Image (cartoon, grey):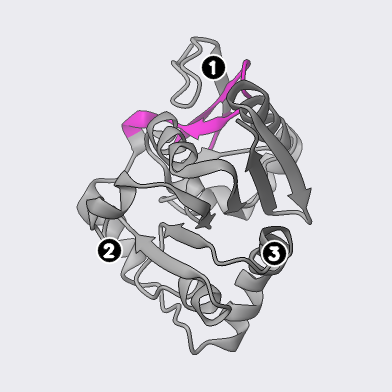
Amino acid sequence: MQLCPLCSSQSADAFHQDKRRVYFRCQACALIFADPEALLSPEDEKAVYDQHENNPDDQGYRGFLNRLAQPLVERLGASPCSGLDFGSGPGPTLSVMLAEMGYNMAIYDPYFADVSAVLDRQYDFVTCTEAIEHFYTPAKEWRLLTDMVKPGGWLGIMTKLATDADAFVQWHYKNDPTHVSFFSRETFRYLAKRDGLKVEFVGNDVILLRKTQ
């Protein structure tokens, strides 16, 4: 048994093992997470991120991010809104796209835009694209994300969703050593019910949550 890093349940069982690490699955919230003993050091983790070449001039990358931006903007409406892109990476792009649409944007990234002052306020929406799977302490980061959303505001997440055990064995997503927390629809439904959120699944990897209280 392992303590779940998301919901703190002590009901996480061994779920899968490959050549690199063991994975556990929480019986309460269904989070799948890598063995804490196998987590990379901050230096090694950043070395992987430094290899990313995403930038706002890459139209393919913009198209990828638009799968979250478009449905989010449809729900935000035209009124002036403020937003934060959490986990913006070495080449912030979603924040640029949303700023071009007229939204007031801030960014945060623990390695590339570590300005903690932006975490001390609330926003009409917070985005987190291809970052939540990197969270070593997902309970802490999840609380931070939801606390930064104003009542009635939106949290937009993009991450590949875990399904069943057979699919996980073949799942390429788990092979990235910086991917350590794997959410599923069941996990997001658990969090939505617990934290007073309304959850929508848009396609296979976009999750929109509205703060109802």
Disc nearest the viewer among 3 and 1? 3
Does residue 19 appear in this view? no
**Alpha-carbon distance for marks 3 and 1?**
41 Å
99 on left or right of 172:
left
Residue 12: image tag:
1
Q: Which residue is labeled 3 in the image?
A: 77
Disc nearest the viewer among 3 and 2? 3
Verify CB contact (< 8 Å) between mark 2 and mark 1: no
Nearest the eye: 157 or 125: 125
Going 50% across and 46% down the picture, which residue do you hit?
A: 133
Q: Earlier in the sequence, mark 2 or mark 1?
A: 1
**Does the magenta run of residues contain 30?**
yes
**Does the magenta run of residues contain 63?**
no
Going 43% across and 29% down the picture, which residue do you hit?
A: 139
- Disc 1 marks a residue whose amino acid type is Ala
Verify CB contact (< 8 Å) between mark 3 and mark 1: no
21 on left or right of 167:
left
Across and down, in percent, residue 98 comes to 54, 73
Magenta range is: 16-37
Going 62% across and 16% down the picture, which residue do you hit?
A: 28
Does residue 205 appear in this view? yes
Across and down, in percent, residue 145 comes to 45, 42
Nearest the eye: 106 or 204: 106
